[in-house]
Image (spheres, helix red, strand yellow):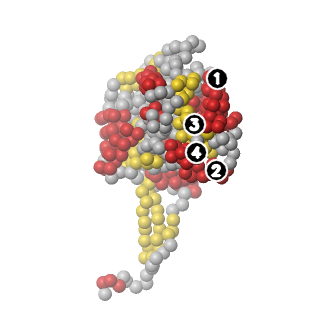
């Protein structure tokens, strides 16, 4: 238990107990509570939004020169690095990720603030080519109050990817973290205040998404929502946004194909496929969960992959040797078990895994072994539906044409992987597969400088990259007349 006291939430800079129900945040490795807090209430939402709107209009943040806002964001990055180990340990407790992974997520958050600070200092508006006796300009201005609704699988990194560009653009931000992982958003709000972000510009409102997230999204003062999470919730937000004529960024689900060709470097491919599906316990939207292997190497490759999966160290997230921690909740583990049972009913053979590990301190946590299923077709429900856990469906393929057809046969189009020594063939497949991100001879590597997002049911819009700041701004065109004579129309 971090503390027996109730944790305060942040209502536009005021740290206080929420007006909602008391609930506990549980450590997934043991099922024990690590924090208690009162969720935000609808009254807290209304007050946070009204006060944030006021802070946006009166704090002067939006009017600061870009380099002045950038200096504060640089300070946020520095404070995250100064407190990195403490933040990583809290992130480990918050969602059960292994400590080495949470350290990487904290470093990513610091890098995100640093990148958007640098991008802000060098961001340029545009003088566009004139088409008459006037000078034309394209400029961008902050929206006002925006909302960030974040997931439980990588809280501090996901929250930084929304907070940093939104603040860089000059906005106020209401953050609604996942109900089960509230700690990191609260820590980031504290750090933002310490760094010099004006009070009131950042709020953190934990609670149920169906209540708090819904109220935030519907509020008329909220000018944009950036959401990362499930496709069903994302579509609901999109409907609300359509009624409001409000732009949204939606980073949703995935069922990403990984394609191993007969000329692939098998050592690299085995390691990459393993990492792509089983790191983060498979609780990743871009997890490479559909594996297509050239038939000529299928048996050898899957045998090597299964043997490697059996050797993965599943256990205590506090240990630096651990590669896979627990799943987020008991309920989520039960969902994954139902999918594995569904796969078996559809004709799958469990090549490895498919059970709860026991002993070594894992009996009370929400652990599950890395699982590989064989014998399914690409049309099976287990192959098509997002499981969001450590379950890989392996399938052979015979032709490149059929491979592309099946890789693209999904409502999702978030990510894909190609493994081949043939540069031209890898390029051809990478361009043919429908996905927002394609990795070639690597997987699940990220750069904040490179835009990220999905197609179809995997979402709308993009995060990251220099253009990411513009996602939180309104574009305005300005015309400066240079004509010597009055406009002739009235003559």
Q: Which residue is mark 4?
A: 399
| Residue drawn at 50 percent across, 27 percent down | 348
CA distance for labels 1 and 4: 32 Å
The answer for how far apart the CA atoms under marks 2 and 3 are is 18 Å
Which mark's residue is nearer the viewer, 1 or 3?
3
* Relative vertical location of residue 297 with respect to residue 402 in this rendering, above or below: above
Q: Earlier in the sequence, mark 2 or mark 3?
A: 3
Give the mark nearest the N terminus, 2 or 1: 1
What residue is disc 2 on?
425
Indicate whether 43 appears above or below 126: above
Q: Are marks 1 and 4 in contact (CB under 8 Å)?
A: no
Q: Which residue is mark 1?
A: 311
Disc 2 is placed on an element classified as helix
At 66% across and 41% down in the image, what residue appears? Answer: 262
- Residue 38 at x, y percent in the picture: 37, 26
Q: Which mark is residue 396?
A: 3
Residue beneath the point at 47% across and 25% down: 344
> Mark 1 vs mark 4: which is more N-terminal?
1
Q: In the figure, 290 relative to 459: above or below?
A: above
Whether label 2 touches label 3, CB < 8 Å: no
């Amino acid at each position: 238990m971090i503390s027996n006291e109730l944790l305060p939430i942040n209502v536009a800079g005021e740290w206080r107990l929420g007006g909602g129900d008391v609930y506990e945040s549980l450590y997934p490795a043991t099922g024990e509570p690590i924090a208690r807090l009162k969720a935000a209430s609808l009254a807290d939402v209304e007050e946070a939004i009204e006060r944030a709107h006021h802070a946006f209009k009166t704090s002067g943040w939006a009017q600061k020169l870009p380099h002045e806002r950038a200096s504060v964001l640089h300070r946020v990055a520095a404070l995250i690095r100064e407190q990195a180990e403490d933040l990583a340990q809290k992130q480990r407790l918050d969602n059960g990720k292994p400590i080495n992974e949470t350290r990487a997520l904290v470093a990513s958050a610091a890098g995100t603030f640093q990148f958007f600070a640098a991008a802000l200092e060098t961001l340029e508006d545009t003088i566009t080519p004139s088409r008459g006796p006037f000078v034309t300009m394209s400029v961008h201005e902050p929206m006002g109050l925006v909302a960030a609704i974040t997931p439980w699988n990588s809280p501090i990194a996901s929250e930084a990817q929304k907070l940093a560009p939104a603040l860089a653009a000059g906005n106020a931000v209401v953050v609604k973290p996942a109900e089960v992982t509230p700690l990191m958003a609260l820590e980031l709000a504290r750090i933002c205040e310490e760094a010099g972000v004006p009070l009131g510009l950042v709020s953190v409102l934990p609670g149920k998404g169906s209540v708090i997230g819904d109220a935030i999204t519907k509020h008329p003062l909220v000018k944009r929502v950036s959401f990362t999470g499930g496709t069903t919730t994302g579509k609901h937000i999109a409907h609300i946004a359509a009624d409001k004529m409000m732009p949204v960024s939606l980073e949703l689900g995935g069922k990403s194909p990984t394609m191993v060709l007969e000329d692939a470097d098998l050592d690299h491919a085995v390691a990459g496929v393993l990492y792509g599906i089983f790191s983060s316990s498979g609780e990743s939207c871009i997890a490479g969960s559909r594996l297509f292997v050239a038939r000529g190497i299928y048996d050898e490759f899957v045998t090597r992959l299964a043997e490697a999966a059996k050797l993965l160290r599943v256990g205590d997230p506090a240990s630096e040797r651990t590669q896979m921690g627990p799943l987020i909740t008991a309920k989520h583990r039960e969902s994954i078990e139902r999918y594995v049972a569904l796969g078996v009913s559809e004709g799958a053979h469990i090549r490895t895994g498919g059970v709860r590990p026991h002993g070594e301190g894992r009996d009370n946590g929400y652990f599950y072994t890395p699982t590989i299923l064989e014998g399914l077709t690409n049309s099976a429900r287990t192959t098509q539906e997002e499981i969001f856990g450590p379950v890989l469906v392996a399938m052979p393929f015979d032709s490149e044409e059929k491979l592309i057809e099946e890789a693209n046969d999904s409502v999702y189009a978030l990510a894909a992987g190609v493994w081949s020594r043939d540069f031209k063939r890898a390029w051809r497949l990478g361009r043919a597969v429908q996905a927002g991100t394609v990795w070639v001879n690597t997987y699940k590597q990220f750069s904040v400088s490179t835009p990220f997002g999905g197609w179809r049911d995997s979402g709308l819009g993009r995060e990251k990259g220099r253009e990411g700041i513009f996602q939180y701004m309104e574009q305005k065109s300005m015309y400066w007349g240079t004509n010597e004579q009055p406009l002739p129309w009235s003559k």
